[in-house]
Amino acid sequence: MLEPLYTADEMRAAEAGHDVDGLMARAGRAVAEQALRRFPEARRFVAVCGGGANGGDGRIAVDVLRSAGREAEASDDVSSADVILDALFGTGFRGEPREDAARRIEGINDAGVPVVAVDLPSGVDASTGEVAGACVDAALTVTIHGRKVGLEVAPGRFRAGEVVVADIGLEPAETEHRLVTAEILGQVPRRRADQNKYTAGTVLVIGGSRGLTGAPSLAAEAAFRADAGYVAVAVPESTLPVFEQRLLEAVKLACPEDGGRISPRAVAPIAEFAAKAGGVALGPGLGRGDGPHEVVARLLAELEVPVVVDADGLYELEPFERSAPTVLTPHEGELGRLLGEESDWVAAHRLEAVRLLKGADTLVAGPGEGVWVCSLGTPALATAGTGDVLTGIVAAFLAKGMEPRLAAAAAATAHQLASREIPQAGAVASDVIGALPLVLGG
């Protein structure tokens, strides 16, 4: 359920002690073979090569392509190319390309033909996915030995195109960061014949300010579809008619309110109710201001059950300590506020910023642990409410007793795989909810 994701240092360690010429020969051949597989009609290949091992791989690929009867050369003149091989920079690159290299990269991108990147697109930091300057846009990346962090973490993953791993005879190695595969869903406990609705997983969703009732509704529906047996919502009393209409199966806890938002006076009854829950989703549609802020702080201090904090629950969240399992699910803007950084900085430095960061790729990490990368999603998730759906799934998996990092990663995987089961154009968050039983084996 977890595959290695290599940093530059880990790749150097994997290659240490091996015949460099032999590795390069196998890598160059693999690049040529994959280029021919993907672009069988292409007649002329031009490799833009750097001075290091990556450039050596590109030059060997040129020789192999010539042997296969294609026109091929190593050159900066790409004007007549049908396909370009990008062999400028390999895993050792980091930072921003120098001016001459940036011009070569721009020439590759401006040629208007498909690009095959050798190991990773030039301009992508292999260890982080960061792109600090000019960067190649590849249609295909033939990565050597194993996937690199930079090929799965945005923004680097958006430059890689299709990724194919080339086996060059190296042994797999342990890596700090891992890629999550669909097999992680096999770790999710399924409802058993000897369970009742309570023991199958009990979830409480807390939120739903006036005008924001959709978010907790989506979270609650997602928790049910993620196989929780019992779901309740704690919402402002004045919004109860909405939830009575929207959520047929959920239990409703009407809470004291101030101005349409849950009041701190509701903390005691919510905490009493939550003590019987296996997982709590805190924040969807909660609203902002002093009252919701106090509600979040007090519940995090008082609850001894697993909690996932999302949306308004993360707004101006102050440092806290809990012994019970806790998952935070910020997107770039929310995490930026927590860290005192702009969202653009978070988007450019996702690995550095991560706790559980939602986006085109979802990054899951715990204190002192490597990052697990979930990158199976589709553009269908780029619509309002899908974050609330993810929160409901996390809460359901926590309620089933899963360890927080495993619950978060499995939930992100289920969420992303569900996005593959629905039409991509015009998708809405509730479509993702409907697809959850398909990916969970229901």
Image (cartoon, rainbow, N blue to C red):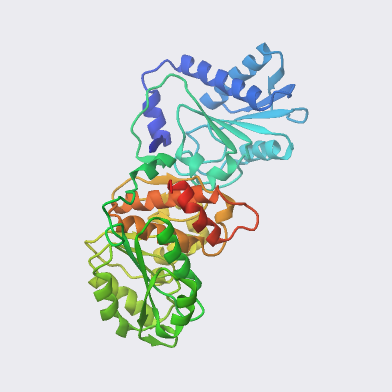
- What count of labels does the image hold? 0
Q: Nearer the viewer, residue 400 or 96?
A: 400
Left or right: 123, with 391 as reference point: right
Up-down: is 206 above or below 181?
below
Q: Nearer the viewer, residue 117 or 299?
A: 299
Let me know if residue 349 appears in the view.
no
Let me know if residue 120 appears in the view.
yes
Rendering coords of residue 148 (x, y %): 46, 36
Up-down: is 352 above or below 275?
above
**Residue 159 position by quadrant:** top right
Residue at coordinates 75% horizontally, 21% vertically from top-left? Answer: 43
**Residue furthest out toward the front:** 193
Residue at coordinates 40% horizontally, 39% vertically from top-left? Answer: 183
Rendering coords of residue 88 (x, y %): 59, 31
Left or right: 177, with 375 as reference point: left
Left or right: 171, with 388 as reference point: left
**Residue 62 position by quadrant:** top right
